[in-house]
Image (cartoon, rainbow, N blue to C red):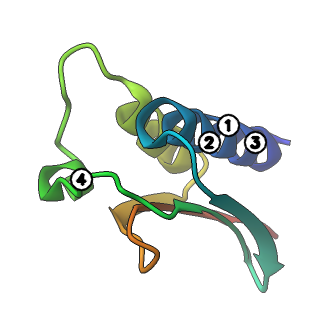
Amino acid sequence: VEVAVAAVRIAGEALANVLHHRGPGLARLQVRRGPGALTVLVEDDGPGTWRPEAADPAWHEPGHHGVVGMRERAQSCGGRLTIGPSVRGGWRVTAVLPVP
């Protein structure tokens, strides 16, 4: 249950960030269960400005807790979160969470 809750919350926060920062456009949510892991991917098609510091696990912008919260949720169940530029031009958030 812990992994399922983390997956839903991470997906929700990532999609909220798309709505807040992206504006009109496309977003893609993909949830895939593979051997030993559940992968949650959210990406948009831009024109968000890629900020390399956001990929740093130690990064935190005052007043903005979404990235930190997503990373903490992933880590709380033994997973990891990566953030980077999307090939579609915007942002890509990927959470890989362990499952039995």
Residue at 75 percent of width and 42 percent of height: 8
Foreground mark, 2 or 1? 2
Tell me residue 7's x, y (percent).
71, 48
Foreground mark, 3 or 4? 4
Q: Amino acid at mark 4?
A: Thr
Q: Amino acid at mark 2?
A: Leu
Q: Amino acid at mark 1?
A: Gly
In contact (CB < 8 Å): disc 4 and disc 1 = no
Q: CA distance from mark 4 to mark 1?
A: 21 Å
Q: Which residue is mark 3?
A: 8
**Quarter of the image containing the C terminus?**
bottom right
Q: Which residue is mark 2?
A: 15
Q: Which residue is mark 4?
A: 49
Foreground mark, 1 or 3? 1
Q: CA distance from mark 2 to mark 3?
A: 11 Å
In contact (CB < 8 Å): disc 2 and disc 3 = no
